[in-house]
Amino acid sequence: MIKTNFKKIILWLCLFVFTAVMILPSFGCGTDSAEGIADSDVANSASFSTDTIYQIVTDRFFDGDTSNNPTGELYDTTDNRKYHGGDWAGITKKINDGYLTGLGITAIWISSPVENITSIDPSNNSAAYHGYWAKDYFRINEYFGSVDDFKTLIETAHANGIKVVIDFAPNHTSTAEYGDMVFPEDGALYRDGELVVTYSNDTEGIFNHEEWVNDSSWENGIYHSLYGLADLNQMNSTVDEYLKDAIDLWLDYGVDGIRVDAVKHMPMGWQTNWLSSIYEEHNVFVFGEWYSGSTDSDSQMEYFANESGMSVLDYRFANAIRSALGTQDMTMRQLYSVIEATESDYNEICDQVTFIDNHDISRFMTLSSSSSSSVDMAYVIQMTSSGIPTIYYGSEQYSTGSSDPDNRADMPSFSTSTTAYQIISKLAPIRKNNPAAAYGTTTERWINSDVLVYERTFGNSVLYTAVNRSSTQGYSITGALTALPDGSYGDILENICGGGTLTVSDGAISSYYLGAGQCAVWQYVANSEDGPEIGNIDPLIGIAGNTVTITGCGFGSAAGSVNFGTTAATISSWSDSCIKFVVPDVSAGYYSIVVTTSSGDSVSDYAQYKVLTASQVAVRLICQEAYTEYGQNIYVVGNCVELGNWDTDKAVGAFFNATSSIAEYPNWFFDISLPAGTEIEFKFIKKDSDGNVVWESGSNHVYTTPTNSTGEASYYFYN
C-alpha cells in the first residue's frame, strides 16, 4: 500500500511539473520542445550564431598530463618556438574547473589534432607545437594526448554545453624548401603510418611545385608555396580522396565544426567539392581563414564567403576594431562604416566569425595606444555586434605579444576577476537568450569620432550598446532613437564600465551622460510568440537528401512546414528556435526557403539556398588559345547550376593564365566543383568589367565528369 501511494504521489508531481512548464510564458528563442532541439543547444552543430568561441593554441593553454610531453630539443618552456606541454587533458581540466563555462564559452576552437612532424624546422628553429605542419592526417599528435584523451575532451565539452571546433590545414604539409637547407622530413605525407610521398620524390603530382607565393594575384596565392611549405595539389585524385577521408575520420569522433586554414590559398572549386562531401554526412559548421590586412571590401573574399559553402574569419571587422580602439587610426564613424558595409556584403553576416586578435596577428594589448580599457571596450563591441565572437585564449587576461611566436605564449593566468573576463561572462549568455544578439540587424543611434551608440534588432527583441573610447572626454547623448519599448533598463554589464539606467519613452531615449572610457549594454527580449523570424540557414549549399538547419525565433513548438518553392521538405526536428529538415528532391538551382508555422504564419529566408545537381567532384577546365582584349577575361557558363545555368551573370571565373606548369596566356584554366558522373554542356565566354560578353562560336562543349575522383578537360576557344 505504501508503494502504491508513493507511485501515485510521483505521478501527481510529474503531472504538476509538466503542467507548470506548459503554462509558463516563453521568452526569447531558446526553449526546447519535445519535438526538437533549440538553436542554443550544444546538439545544434550546424549553426554557431548563439555561441561564443574560445580559440586555444593547445600547447600553450594548460599542461594536464606531463607524461605526453616531448623530450629533447622539441621541448623548452622558455622558448616560444618549442613545445610547452599543453594538451587535451589540460583543456578538459579547465572545462571541469569552470574557467571556460564561467566565461560563458559555448564552443572551443583547438589546434589541429593531426600528427605533425617530430623534427625541428631548420629554417626557423621551431617545433610543430602549433599543429600546422601535418605529417599524417589519420593519426593524432601524440604530444597533445591519446585518442581516448581526445574523445574525453569532446565528451566533457558536450556535457558542459560546449561545442568543439578543430583547426584543419588541407593546404600543405611541412616545410620542404628554403635555400640550400635540408629538411629532415622533406614535407612527407603519410596515411595512417604508410608513406604516401615526399616532396623531393613526387612522381605522382601530389604537391604543387611552383615558386614561392609573391601575392601578385589570387592565382599566385593558390598554386604557389607558402614560404617553402610543401603545397598539396588538391586537384590530384589521391589528395582529394585523402583529405575527404581524413576529415570524415575526425568528424566521426563527434567534432562539431572545422576551422579551415589558408582557404585563400586553395582552389575554391576544390573546396566546394570537399565541403559538399562533408555536408552529405555531417551537419557541422565550417569557417575558413582568408587573411586580409584591410578594412576595404575584397570581392574575391566576399564571393568565397557567399558561394563556397563556408563562412570566413571576418578580418575586415578585426582590422577596423583594432584601428578604432587599439591604434586609434580610425574614428568610431569609420568603424561603424565597416560594420554597416559588411552586413550588406555578406549573404549571412551572422555566420562570419569575428575576433579582435588571434595567433596570426599581434595581441590587442600590444597595439600602440592600447590599454586594458581599450581591450574591454573592444570586447563590448565584438560581443554585441553581428557575427560569431571568438576570444583568443589569454586576451581576457590582457596577454601581450607582437608577432609569432610571442603572440602564442603560455596562458598567463586563469583569473576570473579581470574586467575583460567579467565583460565576456556577462555578454556571452545574452547570445543564447536574446535573438537580437545572434541574428539582429544593426542601426546606428548616435555617433561622433569617439562615441558609437547602436542597436541590433531581430523581430521585437533589441540589444542596445553605447561605447565612448575617449579617455578624457565625456558626452551627453541626446536625441537618440530606439526600438526599445517604453520603460527603464539596467546595464547588462552591471555598471562595471560606467553603465547606468536607460529610460525610454515613445521610441526616444532620455538624455544620458556617457563618461570618458565608459560603455554599457541594455536589452529587451520579446516574447517568442510574436511571430516567426529566420536568423540563419546552415549550410547554404547541398544536394537533395542533405540535412540543413534553420535557426531563428517564433517557429512554435508544434511542427509546421518548410518548402522549397512548392515542394515540402521532410522535417527531422522542430523547436521554437531551430528546425532541421532534409533537402527535398527538387531540380538544382537557387531556392527561397519558406517556413510556415503550425498556426499558418509564414516567413521566407533572406539568402537563397543553392541545391547542387548531385554529389560533387572537382574538375580543371582548360581553355586553349583564347586571345582577349585589354580588360577581358575568360569565364565558363553551362547547363547546370554549378556553371550558372547559361546565365552569364553567374558564369564561373575569371580563369587564370599565369601559372607556368598549368596554363599561360593565351591558355587559361579554372578549377570548378561540378556534379559527379554527369554529362554537361558549356561554352567559354569573354567578359569585361562592364559585363559585356563575347560568346565563343560553334557547338557546345560536352564533357562527362568523373564519378568519384578529380578530372581535367581541355578545349580550344572557338572564335
Image: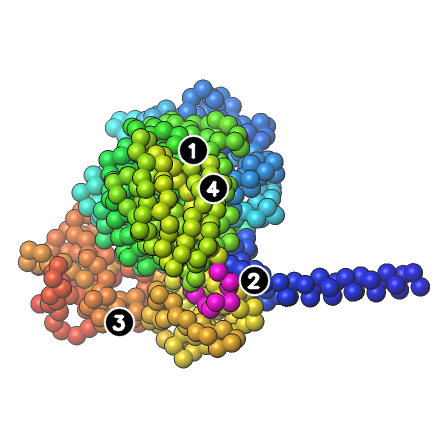
Q: Earlier in the sequence, mark 4 or mark 2?
A: 2
Q: Residue placed farthest to the top in the image?
A: 78
- For residue 356, side relative to residue 433 (left or right): left
User: Which is in the foreground here, disc 2 or disc 1?
Assistant: 2
Q: Residue placed farthest to the left in the image?
A: 629
Residue nearer the viewer, 470 or 621 = 470
Say few, some or many: other residues with alpha carbon within 10 Å of mark 2 (under 14 / 14 to 19 / 20 or more).
some
Q: CA distance from mark 2 to mark 3?
A: 45 Å
User: Which is in the foreground here, disc 4 or disc 1?
Assistant: 4
What residue is shown with label 1?
395
On the image, the x and y values in percent for residue 28 come to: 51, 59
Q: How many marks?
A: 4
Residue nearer the viewer, 9 or 658 = 9
Q: CA distance from mark 3 to mark 4?
A: 52 Å
- For the residue marked with disc 3, what is the amino acid? Asn
Tag 1 secondary structure: helix
What residue is shown with label 2?
26
